[in-house]
Image (cartoon, grey):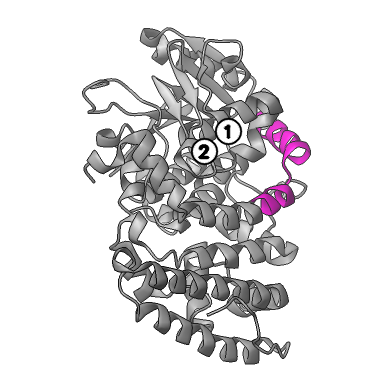
């Protein structure tokens, strides 16, 4: 098979979807007829690569023409808000083959990362085109800033009890603050598919809690022998799960368009735009308390905070390039803190920042001795709430509208969706994990 795109394009979305779907389904059958990826001869591997390459070129062409109208079709003229996983399921039903369906995703989920076909990369192409369309992309950003579907059932208990335990996150009200504690103790509080929903629900609840004025994010204690009993802010993405194929591509999109963007922008409401000129979001100032280290995704979270407090022996790194992926929205946000040269050193060259160093203080607002972190958090909350939180929220919006309006984030995510999909399924990712992290010896 060559990469020539020869399918006809009528310009009528439903007609083109039907005819191109038949072609994509046939290409999927040709791919499925080959031996499993690890068992292919070089010639069979080349055939599989050609099938995938040609299909992606065709999807690009289809979506250049139809992305906006397809989004309108799937959301009933933007009258329905669909989260990205719901949106992609609807797209798979409307135009089979455009993105992988439930059966294909379930089959891919059983494979180690190196053995996947990479069908989810088509999701990245799809989302890149939708996000590049201003109307569809803004609506999708809005959908991802709405409450998580599970939030409403937990809120009454949090309001009543002042605390709540979820499997991988907890909340407790302490004076003016709602403390959110992230927990994945076996993996140094790394983030993965088992933590994402709890984290997003916890951020929603902390934001909506009427009894607190400020939210604080802190890592729980961990089990690792080197750090046993110590708090760790975050080890970033769970590299063990990544290597063994347990991190789906959509995890990246859901995380950065969902929970991280909610910390940065607040929660949207269905009947008003979340753009800052409207001022309709529900939000609170956020404090991050960094014990031990904030690696990768942990460091990315600091860039969405209003105030960062760190232990004076803690450190920060962004090793995503060493792993072979893009570090969330750090490429968009980090240079605002550090300047572009230091941002490139962190992202592209693995530089480590000690939180107490002058360079670390470009991200960290204050440092404290490890044994005094609790008292330092209490002081930070008092300082932040002494004059009321209303002006803090107003100033958050005023900073955002100049630094990162919603359209800037949307266009960044359009690039991120496509490029992260390429990285996530690249052979270089597996090589990096095996070379830099001894991934073969890890236990899933």
Element class at badge 1:
helix
Secondary structure mostly seen in magenta is: helix
Q: Is residue 77 visible?
A: no
Q: Position of residue 297 (x, y in %)?
A: 47, 37
Q: Pinpoint residue 412: horizontal percent, then vertical percent.
A: 67, 49
Q: In the picture, residue 384 is in which quadrant?
A: top right
Q: Position of residue 404 (x, y in %)?
A: 72, 41
**Location of mark 1 (residue):** 348
Compute the Cα span from label 2 to label 1: 6 Å
Can you say whether 227 is above or below 357 in the image? below
Is the Cβ of the residue at disc 2 closer than 8 Å to that at disc 1? yes
Number of marks: 2
In the rendered structure, does residue 142 fall within the stretch colored magenta? no
**338 is higher (above) or lower (below) than 49:** above
Q: Is 362 on the left or on the right of 47, as rendered?
A: right
Per the image, the residue denoted by label 2 is 321
- Asked if residue 52 lies left or right of residue 16, the reply is left
The magenta segment is: 392-412
């Amino acid at each position: 098979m060559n990469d020539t795109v020869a399918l006809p394009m009528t310009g009528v979305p439903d007609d083109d979807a039907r005819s191109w779907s038949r072609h994509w389904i046939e290409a999927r059958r040709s791919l499925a007829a080959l031996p499993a990826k690890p068992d292919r001869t070089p010639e069979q591997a080349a055939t599989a690569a050609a099938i995938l390459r040609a299909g992606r070129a065709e999807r690009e062409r289809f979506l250049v023409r139809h992305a906006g109208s397809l989004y309108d079709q799937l959301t009933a003229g933007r009258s329905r808000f669909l989260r990205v996983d719901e949106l992609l399921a609807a797209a798979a039903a409307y135009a089979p083959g455009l993105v992988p369906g439930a059966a294909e995703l379930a089959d891919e989920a059983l494979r180690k990362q190196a053995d996947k076909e990479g069908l989810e990369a088509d999701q990245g192409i799809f989302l890149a085109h939708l996000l590049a369309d201003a109307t569809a992309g803004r609506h999708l950003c809005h959908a991802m800033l709405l409450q998580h579907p599970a939030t409403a059932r937990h809120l009454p208990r949090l309001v009543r009890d002042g605390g709540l335990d979820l499997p991988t996150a907890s909340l407790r009200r302490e004076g003016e603050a709602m403390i959110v504690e992230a927990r994945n103790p076996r993996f140094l509080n790394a983030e993965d598919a088992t933590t994402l929903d709890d984290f997003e629900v916890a951020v929603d609840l902390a934001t909506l809690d009427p009894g607190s004025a400020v939210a604080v994010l802190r890592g729980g204690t961990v089990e690792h022998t080197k750090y046993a009993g110590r708090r760790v802010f975050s080890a970033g993405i769970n590299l063990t799960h990544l290597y063994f194929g347990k991190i789906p591509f959509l995890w990246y999109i859901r995380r950065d368009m969902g929970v991280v963007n909610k910390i940065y922008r607040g929660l949207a409401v269905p009947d008003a735009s979340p753009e800052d000129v409207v001022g309709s979001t529900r939000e609170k100032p956020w404090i991050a308390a960094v014990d031990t280290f904030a690696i990768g995704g942990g460091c990315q979270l600091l860039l969405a905070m209003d105030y960062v407090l760190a232990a004076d022996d803690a450190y920060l790194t962004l090793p995503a390039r060493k792993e072979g992926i893009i570090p969330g929205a750090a490429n968009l946000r980090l240079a605002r803190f550090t300047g572009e040269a230091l941002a490139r050193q962190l992202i592209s060259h693995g530089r480590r920042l000690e939180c107490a160093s002058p360079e670390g203080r470009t991200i960290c607002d204050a440092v404290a001795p490890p044994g005094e972190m609790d008292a330092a958090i209490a002081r930070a909350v008092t300082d932040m709430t002494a004059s009321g939180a209303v002006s803090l929220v107003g100033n958050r919006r005023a900073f955002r509208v100049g630094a990162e309006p919603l359209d800037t984030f949307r266009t960044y995510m359009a690039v991120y969706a496509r490029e992260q999909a390429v990285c996530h399924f690249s052979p270089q990712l597996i090589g990096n994990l095996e070379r830099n992290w001894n991934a073969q010896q890890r236990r899933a």
